[in-house]
Structure formats: structure tokens, C-alpha cells
Amino acid sequence: MKKLLKYMKGYEKECILGPLFKLLEASFELCVPLVVAGIVDVGIANSDQGYILKMCGLLVLLGAVGFLSSVVAQYFAAKAAVGFAVRLRNALMRNVLRLSYTDVDNLGTGSLITRMTSDINQVQNGVNLTLRLLLRSPFVVFGAMIMAFTIDFQSALVFTGVIPVLCVIVFGIMLVTMPLYRRVQARLEDVTSATRQNFSGVRVLRAFNKEESQVREFQKKTEELNRVQIFAGRISALLNPITFVVINVGIILLVHQGALKVHQGLLTQGMVIALYNYMSQILVELIKMANLIINMTKAAACGSRVEKVLEMRPSGKGTAGEEMSLDGKVSFDHVTFTYAGSSEPSLEDVTFTAQPGQMVGIIGGTGSGKTTLVNLIPGFYTCQEGTVALDDRNVETLSHAGISRQIGLVPQKSVLFRGTIRENLQWRNPEASDEDMKNALEIAQALEVVEGKGGLDAPVEQAGLNFSGGQRQRLAIARALVGSPRILILDDSASALDFATDARLRQAIRNMPNAPTTFVVSQRAASVRYADLILVLEDGQVVGQGTHEELLEGCQVYQEIYYSQFPEEVKAHG
């Protein structure tokens, strides 16, 4: 939590003025019992209405000034807390976006969402309450005790017995609840992850009639969260009643002792009332302090979770900000890769070389490792054995920024962002001209789509929901082509296109001036048939590589895939 304090830089003034105005308000509050004692001992005792009215006016003035001080303190505290949360959330987002795919997989999307939202909100609330109450409550508690000693030393000894007992109770409960709130946040992560998974896969759930099983699974997770929250809440809930009991026992002792002294003429009634009011102030402030400690405990638990993500560094070894230019040669040398937590490798002993300008087709069954292979090219993952090289340079030594300027990637799921078509196309190159974007759209067979929507400034809804699946894929391909990448990766990104459009797309890419090295991942044999090099994957291994004709002669897996899609050619090769 201490490491997060650097994000408070720039709010030093608010961090000083907020507590100071709270202390000013507390000072006025400590004066109130003395004024009330004066009204009782002087005004009421002497039937002096003028004095009573004057003292009542003073009470109103103290209340008004205290209220204004409280408002000003709240303003400064809120400004500092919100500013701190904004900086922290921005820093967390920046660091998450720098993490490798492996790091994000290990953390989990649900966990990151929880830390970005719930955890930071809790930290913000903790900072706000800390600035307002951390100094004020102890100031009032010890101030009230000191004021009580100025009234009567013996009666004030009750305060010295009550306050240590209350401190033991408060801090004891705090130590017990701190680990419990960490468990609460962990269970909240599980619920968030389940919610996200169900919402993103709602169509699949309905297609397979799995709604009831997912409802039961979700209910199980929420019940676990509820159980942990209730247990932590019960421990925290002990704070107020135990505090009330201790304080009220102190008040009973104080009133009893005060009554005896009034009877003996050693104290006035107003003094007893003042002592009672100071004890009541201590009660209120200790309740506030207890709630503050509970919130600080939650904030500390959440802050440590956020801090862990901020301390994470990308697992790659790239040189930040390195400028480079690629010809487009891609080499895999005995590459083996295993996902974190998996017992079996997803790719094993993969070796091939793609020359600049070549079109490489990658084909294989579902789960054969096609997407994993192309994700190693930009360095999204780090292989455990072997090397992936771009222009004979190990990809692990290159910067992510440098690679991204040279590689155009279209993932399996084509994602468009809310905004306009122009804004989406300019992601790779913000300075791209209308002519550059038009050329990319023509190659991607998407120019007519854009013209039909009204041009480059046509709106794009979140996730591109106002476009069909094929339109989204073509726009995503055009986005990757803007900026003339030297390596183009099409990860099953033409699955929603008809065969004719797919063929025109591949031909247009081949005819590009200074054509990029293109990797076409597909389960369609027609999409890779005319590639310069075809890699056939099965269970993470390259079981065949070569041209279409070579593979038809010597690769059984490729033969099975091809003839299953073109049965009419079985006899011709029979």
C-alpha cells in the first residue's frame, strides 16, 4: 500500500488542508460542552436570559463555522481521493496493456476487471475517509479526555480506563478482519469472472441448453461470496455494540461519581453535563474510528492486490522504444511452447522458414496449435525451447513497439471499437491519409462496405455490432494493412467470407507492391491451396510442410483435410 502513495503526488496541498479543516471543526466541537456547562451553571442557575441567549448564539456560531470547516475539508479530501484513484487506475491500465499474453492469462480477465473497478473504488474510499478522520477522531478523543481533566481530575480517570480498553477492541477486530476482506475480494473475482464468461458466451449457453447448470454454478459462487462476506461482516459488526457497552459503562461510572460530587458540592451540575458530553463525543468518535479502521482494512487489502499488478513486469526481454525495419523473414528453430498451467506442450519441435514476401498457409484441425504458432511471431508468448526469429533476430530481444509497427495482425475474433471507421483504420498509423485507407479497403475487399455505410466517418458501434461478421472481418483486415506492414498475420480472419471474396482478398495481397510475408491460418484447404508454403499441424506438431502438390503426394493429414472438402477430386488422384 505504501508504494501507491506516489500517486498522491501533486495533491500535497489537499492532503494538508483537508485534515487541518477537520481539526478546526473538532476544536469548535470540543468547546461546545463548556458553553453548555456555562448555560446550566450561570444562565439557568441565575435565571439570566440574556446570558442564555448569548451562549445559545455562540453555540449557533460554533455550529455554523464547524459546518463550513467540515464542507471545506470534505472538498479537499474528495479532490485528493478522486485524483489519486484516477492516476492509480490509469497507471494500472498502462501496466496491464504492457503485459504479455502469458501474464494476462495467469491473472485472468475477471481478476483484472475487479482490481480496476471494485478494488480501486475501495482504495479511493479509504483515502477519502483517512484524510477526513485519521487525525480528527484521535484529536477529539484525546482532546475530550484533556478537557475532562481540566474540569475534574478524579472523574476524568474514568476516561483513562475506557480509552485503552476501546483501543484494544478496535485494533483486535481490525487484525482479525483484514485477512477476511482479502478473501472477500478473491471471491468477488470469482463472481466477476463467471459473470463475464456467461455474458460473453450467452449464445453458446442457450444453444446447448446449459442455462440451468450455469445458474447453479453462478449461485454456488455467489453463495460462497455471501458466506465470506457475512462472516467478515459479523466480526466487523461486533465493533459497534462492544464499543457502546464499554462507553456506556464509562458513562454510568462517570454520572455516578459526578452525582456524588455534586451532592458534596465539589462539582456543579453543568460540569457533570460537560463530562457526560465529552464521554459522548468520545463514543461518537470511536465509532467513526472503528468504521474508518474497517474501511482502511478493506482499502489496504484491495491496495495490496492492485499493487501486485502494478509491480508486474512484462515477461518478454525486448528493448523498449527500439526503432527497426524488417524485410519479413520469419524463422522457427525447434520451437516448443507450453501454456502456463498446462501439462502438455501446445507446440512441439516446430521448425520452418518463411522468406520475405511469401504467403504461408497454416492448416490443421481444431486445437492443433495454429493460433498458438502465429501468436509466437509478434512475441505475444515466449517459447520454452527453441527460438523465433524475425530477420534472423530473436523476437525476445526486440521491443513490442518496434514489432507492432512492422506486423499487421487480424485475430480470430475481429474486434472493432466504438467510434468511426476512420478511427478504427488509423489504429496502426494515426497519420494515414484517406488514400492510404482507401487502398487498404480495396485490398481487403471492404471499400463497397464503407461506401454503403456512408464513408470513412460512418459510425461504428461497440464491438462493431452494426456490421455483419464478414464486414467486420474485412474492416479488421483493412486496419491491419494500413501502414504497409512487412508481416501480415490472418488468423482464420476470412472464415465469414465466401470463397470468391476470400480468393480475391488473397490475390490482392499477393499483388501488393512490396508484398508482406503473409501467414494465412485457416481450416479451409481452398484458403491455403495456393500458398508458397503450407504448414500442416496436428497435436502441436508440424506433420507436413511444402506446396499443395507436395503435400497431396506425401502428407496423409493434408490429404484427409483436402479430400474431405473436395471429394470430387478423390477419383482424379485415385
Image (cartoon, rainbow, N blue to C red):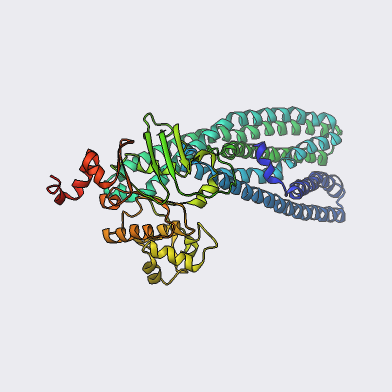
Q: Picture coordinates of residue 55 (x, y %)?
A: 84, 52
Q: Residue at x 36, y 30 (%)?
A: 344
Q: Picture coordinates of residue 97 (x, y %)?
A: 53, 46
Q: Who is closer to the viewer here, 146 or 374?
A: 374
Q: Residue at x 61, y 34 (%)?
A: 239
Q: Picture coordinates of residue 470 (x, y %)?
A: 33, 59
Q: Who is closer to the viewer here, 381 or 249?
A: 381
Q: Picture coordinates of residue 236 (x, y %)?
A: 58, 34
Q: How many marks?
A: 0
Q: Quadrant of residue 144?
A: top right
Q: Quadrant of the C terminus?
A: top left
Is there any visible trace of residue 479 in the rendered image?
yes
Is there any visible trace of residue 469 in the rendered image?
no
Q: Quadrant of residue 148?
A: top right
Q: Quadrant of the N terminus?
A: top right
Q: Is residue 291 left or right of residue 279?
A: left
Q: Who is closer to the viewer here, 107 or 103?
A: 103
68 over 345 or under it: above or below: below
